[in-house]
Image: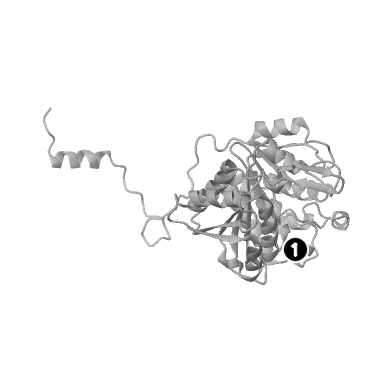
Amino acid sequence: MARRSAPLLRRLVAAASPPAPEPLPGHGGGLARRTVTYMPRPGDGTPRAVTLIPGDGIGPLVTGAVRQVMEAMHAPVYFETYEVRGDMPTVPPAVIESIRRNKVCIKGGLATPVGGGVSSLNMQLRKELDLYASLVHCSNLPGLPTRHEGVDIVVIRENTEGEYSGLEHEVVPGVVESLKVITKFCSERIAKYAFEYAYLNNRKKVTAVHKANIMKLADGLFLESCREVASKYPGIQYDEMIVDNCSMQLVSKPEQFDVMVTPNLYGNLVANTAAGIVGGTGIMPGGNVGQDYAVFEQGASAGNVGNEKIMEQKKANPVALLLSSAMMLRHLQFPSFADRLETAVKRVVAEGTYRTKDLGGTSTTQEVTNAVIANLD
């Protein structure tokens, strides 16, 4: 086959190329530029089923806010609702089946009896679905004054073992043993999740929180696992901090932290403390994720079922669960809907006209919900 000359090739390419677009009016004769941040894939617009658990206390109020906002923005999700209460002996099998089928759940708080009584249904869900990572994003919201500025912390907590293993027994009357279980597998898995999260979200540092100076074997194994994983991410700074020192540093200089990876109990304490620093548990989103399933809820556990007075006055803060539902939408690969929801919520908080009592206002849950809907783009 004869070789084509360069002039001939140029003519063929020019003939095949589409004509240059006309300059748009109002752009100085130049072309309008549009940045594509997300390219939808086939099937991305298909409505997704989500399991919804209203929960106890203020749960029905805040999950009701989520439903209203989702309907107002025509988000491509629909809900399968199941009534679950914290005093039930177990999570009903139909609920577990629904989450396994839908892969995603959003829930209100479930009250856990203190002392005797039934075991925590939250823990049952995490173990049954292997939701090994709890993620809580604690950051300053624009327009909400706090003691510290520039706080942007992600707490990643191992969610299935440690002191929450539920292995307790009475050796003899008056003597109780409670077992703390730490495994290499779970420690490596949560460390990998933390470093992958940091890498994918352009985070600079991961801090491992521990008490290995006292619990040398258990927390020592956790630290050993974190160090091994850290060595595979040379571009991410890694440090370690004893949990009691971490508590003091968190309330005095929280802006030093970026991503924090912790065993189970420490993570619960750290996340609730960090939430209090940036405005309270009513504004912090969170989720529990595993290999196959994800359950989104208020990020910090303190006050997630509220009290009788808040329920009677219907003044529960829906911000945390609304932001958690934005996390859920991103998880479902609906980023444009997530951005719209998050922007509307932050705009309402920044304007300050509609805030619940925990944020210094007097608004009801419904008033805040209406304001968010009015601010949807």
Left or right: 30, with 364 as reference point: left
Residue sticking out furthest to the front: 172
Left or right: 198, with 262 as reference point: left
Rendered-image quadrant of the C terminus: bottom right
Q: Residue at x 65, y 47 (%)?
A: 287
SS state under label 1: loop
Q: In terms of image quadrants, where is residue 3?
A: top left
Of 150 and 127, nearer the camera is 127
Q: Residue 19 location in percent, x, y? A: 31, 45
Of 365 and 156, nearer the camera is 156
- Which residue position holds label 1? 355
Of 203 and 376, nearer the camera is 203
Residue sticking out furthest to the top: 1
Colour theme = one colour
Rendered-image quadrant of the N terminus: top left
Left or right: 356, with 230 as reference point: right
Q: Residue 252 location in percent, x, y? A: 64, 71
Q: Residue 261 location in percent, x, y? A: 59, 53
Q: In terms of image quadrants, where is residue 52?
A: top right
- Residue neighbourhood size for the residue with mark 1, other residues' Cα within 10 Å, grouped as few (<14), some (14–19), many (≥20): many
Q: Residue 249 location in percent, x, y? A: 62, 67
Q: Answer yes or no: is residue 191 visible.
A: yes
Q: Residue at x 86, y 49 (%)?
A: 174
